[in-house]
Image: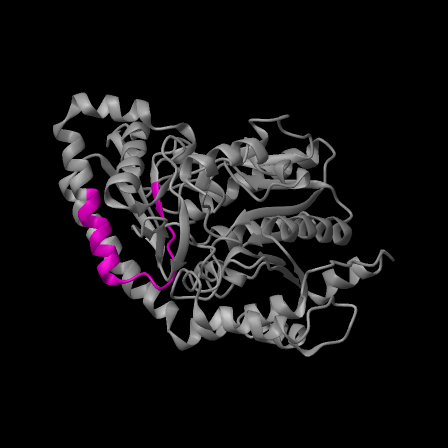
Amino acid sequence: MRDKETLAMREKLIGRSCRLFYSDDPVKIVRARGQYLFDENGKRYLDCISNVHHVGHCHPSITKAAAAQMDLLNTNTRFLHDSIITYAERLAATLPEKLGVFYFVNSGSEANDLALRLARQYTQHEDVIVLDYAYHGHLTSLIDISPYKFRKLAGQKEWVHVVPLPDTYRGMYRDNHPNPGQAYADTVKDLIEDVHRKGGKISAFFAESLPSVGGQIILPQGYSAKVAEYVHAAGGLFVADEVQTGFGRVGSHFWAFQLQGEDFCPDIITMGKPMGNGHPVACVVTTVEIAKAFEDNGVEYFNTFGGNPVSCAIGLAVLDVIEKEDLRGNAVRVGAHLKDLLNKLQAKHRIIGAVRGVGLFIGLELVTDREKKTPATETAALVVKRYGTKDQIVISTDGPWDNVLKFKPPMCFTVEDAELVAKSIDRVLTGQLNTPVLYSWYYRIVCFVTISLTHNL
């Protein structure tokens, strides 16, 4: 089917709210391998945003494991089989000892919805605290606790409470603060006190271990441990959303929450996207005590596809590849090299306000004025457009003003890929600064969805 025919049929058959990248000139991808996508004409694109395809698109070890298990057995968890137990044991080995009870589901949204249920059942409280600009999924229950979404829809529920995003670049407490982690944690303490004065009770504090939609934010040291202390004192639980950041993306640790130190351990962790390398598998892990409270409600929890043998075989294969190919080490090495290259570009281009990140989770914040930190949304849109159509590099933006270029590529990303990315950014920014008339023209042709579609990747 030719491009125009495919587009016409898509517009007819698929809901218009399911948007395309580069909607003014869509790219038709027909195959992928590693960190590369290929269109129908054989043109290759470097993928800088597919954190779902964690160990690389169509990794042969993953496809082999999937096909072999699919040819043998695929049933639900009401039948006894070994793979779900083996998979849970392998995951448990990466986590603190107290987190040892697993519930397998199909998506990050399902995982976060179940985490909310677990927290409410255990605490018998309703209220939830979330970070500003957070996104935790597309189910109704999760839109309710996602400021990024609910502000565009029905608004904030009475039982939802929003605390400031701990952004040390443009937030209320910045890098020059003597202890931003404590200062931001104290905003949670203050909010809890306010909730209690109004008769509310906290069931959970939800946070991504590294806020992504908020702009690739690195939480200040000490923040999570102190927040957990305050939340526990209020009778609530700390839920760490690792759907985008888990499985070694940060390099130095297997889980992003571990960046906060050995003295911090969440009560519930949700995981998803990278687990199946593109196959739908996700999970919730919690403590024996919390799981027991959920069991005691007398209602069975059953998920038709969650934890099926094929999903577990794929999940195990992903863990094997991470280990055998030293993808955590690769994230450390390549991520550090990319950050170094971007820091050098920051010294050259004043439009680059900040470079932040860890491992292969990196953000490049563009501003029109470094002192005022005015978001350079238009330039970010231009870079995304030029990258995709001219340089064949797929990136997108995040942040409240869509001015943060985000890099969450497959973990097989190489030093050479990082150098290509930096050279292309340098060329695009240099060209943009030297052609102010074209700047405005380019921005007009960039459809809004180009810079907003990948928030959920």
Q: Is residue 58 above or below residue 455?
A: below
- Which color scheme did the rendering employ for the protein? one colour
Q: Is residue 414 magenta?
A: yes
Residue furthest out toward the front: 1
Q: Is residue 436 above or below residue 203?
A: above
Return the x and y of residue 71 as percentages of the image width and height.
Answer: 63, 73
| Residue 101 quadrant | bottom right
Residue 316 visible (yes or no):
no
Q: Is residue 318 magenta?
A: no
- Left or right of 58, for residue 298: right
Return the x and y of residue 139 as percentages of the image width and height.
Answer: 65, 41
Residue 182 visible (yes or no):
yes
The residue at 78%/58% (across/down) is 301
The residue at 35%/58% (across/down) is 35
Observer-nearest residue: 337 or 262?
337
Observer-nearest residue: 151 or 308?
308
Observer-nearest residue: 361 or 418?
418
Return the x and y of residue 438 as percentages of the image width and height.
Answer: 19, 24
Residue stretch rendered in magenta on the structure? 405-425
- Left or right of 346, for residue 181: right
The residue at 46%/73% (across/down) is 61
* Quadrant housing the N terminus: top left
Residue furthest out toward the right: 298
Q: How many marks do you count on the picture? A: 0
Return the x and y of residue 314 as percentages of the image width and height.
Answer: 55, 69
Observer-nearest residue: 221 or 13?
13
The residue at 15%/43% (across/down) is 347
